[in-house]
Image (spheres, rainbow, N blue to C red):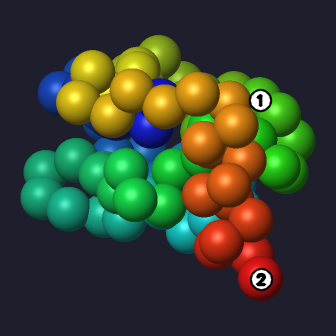
Amino acid sequence: MALMINDDCIACNACPSVCPNEAITEDEPIFTIHPQRCSECIGETGEPQCKEVCPVDCIEPNPDYQETPEQLQAKYDRLHR
């Protein structure tokens, strides 16, 4: 399942640099995770790095993008060919 950033985001800029898929961009007023690029770091670290660095715990599963670990791995593989 892709992740999303909720309205608790303080736009601290901690998360974009740790995303291996460049899925996080700055929007107004908060950051956005693009679900087509988010693999929850499966294929890289196995743990969502954005969640690890978020100081306000505003990153959660995106209910609109239900994906299995295998689908997330395939997405990562496509992005890193």
Q: Residue at x 43, y 46 (%)?
A: 12
Q: Residue at x 72, y 47 (%)?
A: 73
Residue 77 point in image, percent of width and height: 74, 65
Mark number, residue 81: 2
Q: Amino acid at mark 2?
A: Arg
The residue carrying pointer 1 sits among few (fewer than 14), some (14 to 19) or many (20 or more) residues within 10 Å by Cα, namely few
Q: Quadrant of the C terminus?
A: bottom right
Q: Residue at x 56, y 68 (%)?
A: 22
- Report the residue marked by disc 1: 47
In the rendered image, which quarter is residue 42 located in? top right
Relative to 43, is 37 on the left or the right? left
Residue 44 point in image, percent of width and height: 85, 51
Residue 35 in sight here: yes
Relative to 3, is 14 on the left or the right? right
Residue 49 in sight here: no
Q: Are marks 1 and 2 in contact (CB under 8 Å)?
A: no
Count the marks: 2
Instruction: Looking at this view, name the residue that lies furthest to the left.
Output: 28
- The secondary element bearing badge 2 is classed as loop
- Is 25 drawn above or below residue 19 in the view shown? below
Pick whichever of labels 1 and 2 is earlier in the sequence.
1
